[in-house]
Amino acid sequence: MSDKSTRTYDSILELLPSADNPTPIVRIQRIGGFKRAKVYAKLEWYNPFGSVKDRVAANLVRDATERGEHLENLVEPTSGNTGIGLAMLSNANNYRFSATLSKAIPVEKRTALRLFGTDLVELDDDLCPMPGQPEGAMAKAAELAQRPGWTELNQYSNPANPEAHYRTTGPEIWRQTGGGVTHFVASLGTCGTITGTGRFLKEKNPDVKVIGVHPTEGHDIPGVRSRRALALADFFKPEEYDDIIEIGDDEAYELCRRLNVEESLIAGPSSGLALAGALQAIPDDEGVVAVVIFPDNAFKYSSSFRRHLPGLFPADEAEQSAPVNPFASTLAAAFDLAQVGPDVIDADEAKRLLDSGVPIVDVRTPDEVEQVHIDGSVPLPLSELAEGETQGLPADHAQEVVTICSAGRRSLYALLLLKAQGYQNVKSVDGGMGAWITAGLPIAIL
Ligand SMILES: Cc1ncc(COP(=O)(O)O)c(C=O)c1O
């Protein structure tokens, strides 16, 4: 028998949030150095299926059911979290669930969806599904929903999305702050969170400041959209927000790391993004009570952290770059010399060479290349290069070649191997893909 006071429940669905059963808000203690303002993170990973989108999934299903729709087979385009919520609600309600989504979505989320029994239709689409792309997740879901017995609830244009937040997130925050909230900050994806919560809070108190935070164009933060992509979002209502702030990947990932280390909050990348915006927008004044949405936790994003926080993986890099031929100690000595030599160039110089037609040889593993790479680069794993594979390399040994890996070690071994094969003009990119991304140079995400 359910008993909320002892947290005993008959069904997992009773854990869905409401003003009586809110997700927690926790005060940020150190980051930002706020002395007077109270800044709270609203921890959305306390939702039963792990993210803010559980609210939306639940409200989409509730709304359709109350409108008398007979739900049996659901298909939904998703950047992952709505899919996860809908997958679990489908399991609870005996629906069949199919998700159309981009292969650029972190493998951890796609794995979770498979584990939850979802049929996945994986596509070459943007990280966050966008309308107007004939081969994209939205078009595919719309096509699959034409089959008899199938329904697309469509979080991107269904008012039940912002309504979920109007009905739950807003009232929770109002109650949790005793009506004292002055600032509300959310990252922007479908914009259901900001628009629904913002409307509720402004109805309660028109002076509440509603602040949206979005990433830069070409970003790598799952669940959120750049300004260009936001322009196509039905629930993006800039006229209803007081401020819109743009944050780069580096700042978002670094703040995400700091949240985990300094605040003991297991926050994911879009929480770092939202907090970065909050740090710009929230004055450290007496009476300020800010609530920042932290959409989900860090555990679904290890492949993203591998790309953006390469400093976390030094052992990995050393292991993968271990000398690959029998003359290990000679190679190691040559390596040390090469590391400080003129053949190590920075990412901007590599880009300049690429633009002038010099091939960039990416010596990482195919898995790493699949996650993110430079358009037009030549994939040739170090292990294959060491075995004499030359596919994609220029036939003319006098021609310039640039090598790249994730942090600049394997590419240096590759440089030595290529020189040993007779290439006279080889350069290695210092800091590898990590430095390339940090420099804001263009990447392709598969
Ligand atoms: C991790 C994450 N952060 C932020 C958002 C943005 O929320 P909204 O779609 O309500 O704007 C999403 C949405 O899917 C998300 O999954």
Image (tube, rainbow, N blue to C red):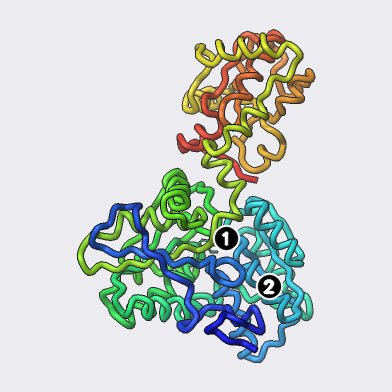
Q: Position of residue 267 (x, y in %)?
A: 50, 57
Q: Position of residue 296 (x, y in %)?
A: 53, 62
Residue beneath the point at 70% across and 78% down: 151
User: Viewer-proximal residue, 319 or 424?
Assistant: 319
User: Please, what is the three-letter code of the amino acid marked with disc 1?
Assistant: Met
Above-or-below relation of 393 to 105: above
Residue 83 seen from this side: yes
Quarter-wise, where is residue 182 in the image? Answer: bottom left
Residue 232 seen from this side: no
| Residue tagged 2 | 88
Q: Indicate the secondary structure of the residue bearing disc 1.
A: loop
Quarter-wise, where is residue 432 in the image? Answer: top right
Residue beneath the point at 45% across and 34% down: 439
- Mark earlier in primary sequence (2, 1): 2
User: Please, what is the three-letter code of the amino acid marked with disc 2?
Assistant: Met
Above-or-below relation of 73 to 295: below
Number of the label disc, if any, that sits on residue 130: 1
